[in-house]
Image (cartoon, rainbow, N blue to C red):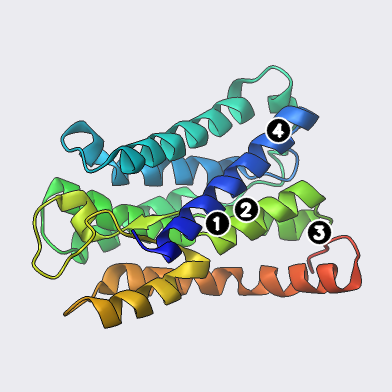
Amino acid sequence: MNVFRFAGDMTHLFSVLVLLLKIYATKSCSGISLKTQELYALVFLTRYLDLLTDFISLYNTVMKLVFISSSLAIVWCMRAHPVVRRTYDKDQDTFRHYTLVAGSLVLALLFHDRFTIREVCWAFSIYLEAVAILPQLVLLQRSRNVDNLTGQYVFFLGNSSVCFYERELLSCKPVAHCTDLHERAYRAFYILNWIYRYFTEQHFSRWIPWIAGLVQTGLYADFFYYYYLSWKNNVKLQLPA
């Protein structure tokens, strides 16, 4: 494990804790997109199929279980919690997220490393994760005024790559040029991680997560700009309509 992967893990974990703090402390999910949370839950469930068959390390297993359980817990709170669910703004959260699922599935069937269930599911999770934040960004743009905890959640989520595992993680097979089978890159750290691995591992190349990561980061660019302005001017975060 290198420092960039660990930093990404911790940043993503912190973003989840911020969101859970908002929900449980305020008993409100206002400003949070249920559709984005459902997409992330689907991302983790389809990516971590190897939990049923392989053991890589205790850290690896614990982090996978944390990401899956926390995503499902957030979805449950927004759908079933007697108080929290009343604060969900369904009228604003209208992005047709099933189109993202369908598009990601088509891409996974067309572009993958090998045509197996696990490889296709892995590719599907990478493509879907790249666009899973879209319903959340659209919701924030519609509501315009963003409370501090919601803004911090999206900021830290954007600085972590809600994870994409590389091919070796799912295949769990020895690969000559792979020195860490559970290497993970994250949005704010994936460029550093790629540079590090490019110079330390022979023939390191992962075009699917690279392209998806670039798309994912591009989607956050506008939010990061306005987040920076709000921080610089010490004012509440507001997004343009």
- Residue contact between numbered discs 1 and 2, judged by CB atoms under 8 Å: yes
Q: Where does the image place residue 176, in percent across and percent down from the top left?
A: 8, 67
Q: Where does the image place residue 43, in percent across and percent down from the top left?
A: 39, 47
- Residue contact between numbered discs 4 and 2, judged by CB atoms under 8 Å: no
Cα–Cα gap, marks 3 and 4: 20 Å
Q: Which residue is mark 4?
A: 23
Numbered disc 4: secondary structure: helix
Q: Residue at x 57, y 63 (%)?
A: 159
Picture layout, residue 42 above or below residue 102: above
Numbered disc 3: secondary structure: loop
Mark 2: give few (<14), some (14-19) or many (20+) Cα within 10 Å.
Answer: many
- The quarter of the rendered structure image containing the C terminus is bottom right
Going from N to C along the chain, the mark reached first, 3 or 2, is 2
Cα–Cα gap, marks 3 and 1: 16 Å
Q: Residue at x 27, y 53 (%)?
A: 182
Q: What's the residue type where badge 1 is placed?
A: Ile
Cα–Cα gap, marks 4 and 1: 18 Å
- Residue contact between numbered discs 4 and 1, judged by CB atoms under 8 Å: no
- Residue contact between numbered discs 3 and 1, judged by CB atoms under 8 Å: no
Numbered disc 1: secondary structure: loop
The answer to whether any part of residue 96 appears in the image is: no
Q: Is residue 182 left or right of residue 235?
A: left
The disc at residue 133 is 1
Answer with the quarter of the image where residue 197 lies. bottom left
In this view of the protein, which residue sits in the foreground, 22 or 122? 22
Q: Which residue is mark 2?
A: 136
Q: Where does the image place residue 233, in percent across and percent down from the top left?
A: 90, 72
Q: Which residue is mark 3?
A: 144
Most distant residue in the bottom direction:
199
Numbered disc 2: secondary structure: helix
